Image (cartoon, rainbow, N blue to C red):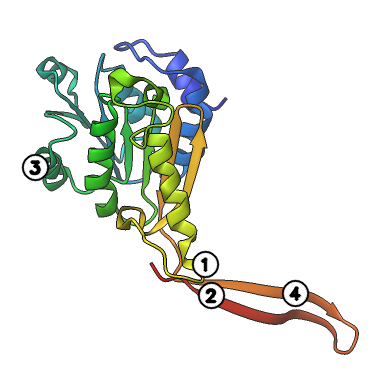
Amino acid sequence: MGDLWRNFMENQDEVIDKWRHYFPAYERHFESWRDRSLVFLEIGVSKGGSLKMWQRYFGPYATIVGIDIDSKCREFESPGVHVRIGSQSDAPFIDSVVEEFGLPDVVLDDGSHHMDDVIATFEHLYPLMNSNSVYLVEDLHTGFLEEYGGGADSPLNFLHYAHEGVMQMNRHWARVPAERNPVFDDTRSVSFYDSLVCFEKGSPRTLVADQVGRTKSKGLRSRIATRTHTVVR
């Protein structure tokens, strides 16, 4: 594992509670944002340690924002680390956070883990985010638990819901126009891990396929043919 794992294991500040197998996914999807100006939004502050871990990881240009329903979490604020108190499913509250700090470049949903909250936050915030932004939802094993509003075959299980994002990415290939969920528009990738799903924003409007190589009649050419496909979303 990389720098973030060492950052975690050497932590001497407030408690951080994370599954080990999350760290390779974190580094894969968050690495490009290090040492850049960004807004990082963590939903769920809990014991407070992860906010400082993310600040150490992303570097001095990052604005770290945590939200939680527990007012005691305000004590975890420090220079460059901000905490706001409210529910992740409260759209006006989320809007107030965005108005104060700007649209997040990276979102990590480690909040209530209830499926209705996870979906409500995603459907409100994700469509607003800019190209190249990252939205990662963790602890999705709760999607299999009825007490969290899920179930193995429930359409509210966020893993089932996120699969619709994969379908939406590819529906422009359908010969017959298909129904679409505009929430997933402008999605470049959807990555699934054990208990994690990560969405990356940004998709091309035109797809280009090239044929490159040698032909007997015309010798070596850098490009033989090009075809394009227009993405309609």
| Residue 166 place in picture, x, y as percent | 47, 50
- The tally of labels here is 4
Q: Callout 1: helix, strand or loop? A: helix
Q: Earlier in the sequence, mark 4 or mark 2?
A: 4
Q: Is residue 84 above or below residue 188?
A: above
Name the mark on residue 212.
4
Disc 1: which residue: 173
Marks 1/3 in contact by CB < 8 Å: the verdict is no
Label 4 to label 3: alpha-carbon separation: 52 Å
Name the mark on residue 229.
2
Name the mark on residue 92.
3
Mark 4 or 2: the one toward you: 2
Callout 2, which amino acid?
A: His
| Residue 4 place in picture, x, y as percent | 47, 26
Label 1 to label 4: alpha-carbon separation: 24 Å
Q: Earlier in the sequence, mark 1 or mark 4?
A: 1
Q: Callout 2: helix, strand or loop? A: strand
